[in-house]
Image (tube, helix red, strand yellow):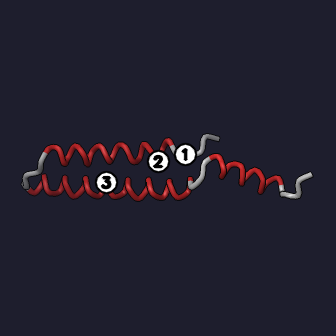
Amino acid sequence: MSKIDPELKKKLLKESQSPFKGLRRILWIALSGSAFLGLLIMLAKIASGSELQQNNLLIQLGACIIFPALLFFDRNKD
């Protein structure tokens, strides 16, 4: 009936169910790295004695939790 290779058909079906998965994973990795780098810089500023607003630190901590969580939930389920 179909002339498509079964492996290719399986791969295309998987891609159609979750499009741009590779691009999303790269985005989550980049945003996670940026959040952790920003947190490291903020902690270095705190250690040097600079004043930081608590809101900024909480936003950075939230980003350090949310982006890796999105990366975790976007993993393969099989």
Label 1 Cα neighbours within 10 Å, binned few <14 / some 14-19 / many ≥20? few
The residue located at (64%, 46%) in the rendering is 17
Q: Describe the element under mark 1 as helix, strand or loop.
A: loop
Q: Which residue is mark 1?
A: 75
Q: Earlier in the sequence, mark 3 or mark 1?
A: 3
Q: Amino acid at mark 1?
A: Arg
The disc at residue 36 is: 3
The residue located at (41%, 59%) in the rendering is 30
* Disc 2 + disc 3, Cβ < 8 Å: no
Q: Amino acid at mark 2?
A: Leu
Left or right, residue 56 beside residue 5? left
The residue located at (59%, 45%) in the rendering is 76
Q: Amino acid at mark 3?
A: Phe
Left or right, residue 59 beside residue 29? left
Q: Which residue is mark 2?
A: 71
Mark 3 → mark 1, Cα distance in angstroms? 20 Å
Name above or below for residue 2 compared with residue 77.
below
Name above or below for residue 57 compared with residue 31.
above
Left or right, residue 17 beside residue 72? right
Residue 59 drawn at (x, y percent): 24, 46
* Disc 2 + disc 1, Cβ < 8 Å: yes
The one nearer the camera, 5 or 68, is: 5
Mark 2 → mark 1, Cα distance in angstroms? 7 Å
Q: Earlier in the sequence, mark 2 or mark 3?
A: 3
Q: Nearer the viewer's eye, disc 2 or disc 3?
A: 2
